[in-house]
Amino acid sequence: MLDLLYKRRSIRKYASEKLDVDTVQLLLGAALLSPSSRGFQPWQFVAVDDPEVLTQLASCKKGAGFLKDAALGIVILADPEKSDVWIEDASIAATILHLTSASLGLGSCWIQIRERQFSESETAEQNIRRILGIPENLKVTSIISIGYPDEFKSPHVEGDLGFDKVHLNKYGSKF
Ligand SMILES: Cc1cc2nc3c(=O)[nH]c(=O)nc-3n(C[C@H](O)[C@H](O)[C@H](O)COP(=O)(O)O)c2cc1C
């Protein structure tokens, strides 16, 4: 796990190779294993592997363009009626997907949707809702883009960790 945490990076360049069905199934299974508050599991997932749909989604906000070249985009939805902490639950599922991708040798990146704009008059969420036909009761929180990596990023190194953000017993007391 620690090795994985150091190696995990946000990968935004993907090879053209597709993911096989078993790999997609593994990824979605991992997301469905995510812990959630009181086990309410307020999330749902839309797995998108159609290049045309990925290209449409890639325009949902600035800085999501790389999604068009991904083999897979997993759109994370959550139902606020099912849990008051749906944001946390959806974020955990997104993190699990990001880490599982890295563990399988895949590159992935979190694309933030909640609180982001498509245009002045339309949110990224509304835009995606329209493209994918998502019902109004479900929030769109993020998309995880996934594919075989076409860029290498150096792993994190222990010396760069921000231990100044960690306090011992009392705020301001150095760890
Ligand atoms: C909540 C959250 C939202 C993010 N949103 C985006 C995004 O919209 N687009 C993007 O390219 N990267 C996004 N990222 C990836 C971060 O930019 C990235 O994790 C950060 O720069 C650290 O780099 P690393 O993941 O390679 O360690 C997001 C990450 C998180 C956790």
Image (spheres, rainbow, N blue to C red):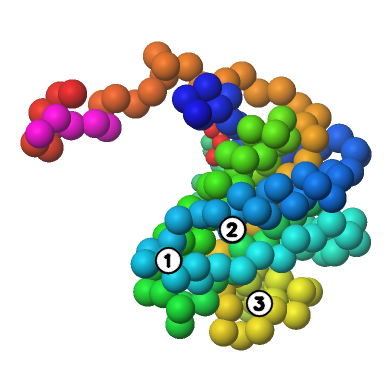
Q: Is residue 106 visible?
A: yes
Label 3 with label 1: CB-CB less than 8 Å = no
Helix, strand or loop at mark 3: helix
Q: Amino acid at mark 2?
A: Leu
Q: Is residue 119 magenta?
A: no
Foreground pick, 12 / 117: 12
| Total marks placed | 3
Q: Amino acid at mark 1?
A: Gly
Give residue 32's mark.
2
Q: Position of residue 142 (x, y in %)?
A: 60, 59
Magenta stretch, main secondary structure class = loop
N-terminal of the pair, mark 2 or mark 3, is 2
The label on residue 10 is: none
Q: Name which quarter of the figure residue 122 lies in.
A: bottom right
Circle on res. 126: 3
Residue 115 visible in the picture? no
Tag in front: 2 or 3: 2
**Towards the viewer: 132 or 64:** 132
Q: Label 1 vs label 2: CA separation?
A: 11 Å
Residue that badge 1 annotates = 39
Label 2 beta carbon less than 8 Å to ligand 1: no
Contact between labelled residues 2 and 1, with CB atoms less than 8 Å apart = no
Mark pair 3, 1: CA separation: 28 Å
Position in image of residue 119 (x %, y %) = 67, 70
Q: Which residues are magenta?
A: 165-169
Residue 103 placed where, x, y %?
64, 33
What is the quadrant of the C terminus in the image? top left
